[in-house]
Image (tube, helix red, strand yellow):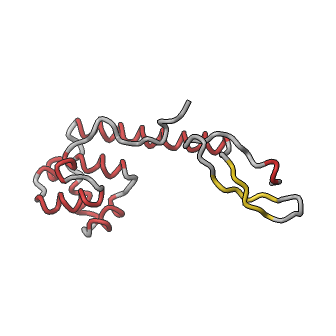
Amino acid sequence: MDKQDVPQDVGLAGRMREVTYAVNAQGRYEAVPSYGWAPKTVALEQAWERILQRLEAVRAQVAAGELSPLAWHMERHQMNPGLLAGYVGLSRWRVRRHLKARVFRRLKPALRARYAAVFGIAPEALGRVPEDPGLVFLANRE
């Protein structure tokens, strides 16, 4: 892509710039600031909408007692049981077991604290699903 063809569309983060490499007049690659590209923005918006839909589905399962709040926090941080197990230092099957509401309610405080530390929240907050997921990526959209 030539330097003059670098897209300057406003992206998801507003007028935040990113670096794109383009060919200058001498035929060499050069770092050119870009505000984004509309198709990329659309793809990112669709991905975030999908993430929000998954969060709402998990929230409904937690409210119905099918899953523990741990499942919602795991989904919010886009983790799977294997990844979370690695961070907490447990086996995958134990993490999967803790996703059951009945089992989660009986977790010892020390284990809850380990999970909470991974998510960067207080141990008491681990047992709740907040109304607002705290994702602000679309807050500045027109």
Q: Residue at x 21, y 62 (%)?
A: 114
Q: Residue at x 30, y 38 (%)?
A: 59
The quadrant where residue 98 appears: bottom left
Q: Nearer the viewer, residue 62 or 88?
A: 88
Q: Residue at x 81, y 53 (%)?
A: 3
Say if 56 sits above or below 30 in the image.
Answer: above
> x%, y% of residue 5?
80, 48
Which quarter of the rendered picture does the N terminus lie within? bottom right
> x%, y% of residue 8?
71, 43
> x%, y% of residue 58?
32, 41
Q: Residue at x 21, y 47 (%)?
A: 125
The quadrant where residue 142 appears: top right
> x%, y% of residue 117?
25, 60
Describe residue 20's horizontal placement relative to residue 52 as left or right: right
User: Residue reaching furthest top?
Assistant: 142
Q: Nearer the viewer, residue 37 or 34?
A: 34
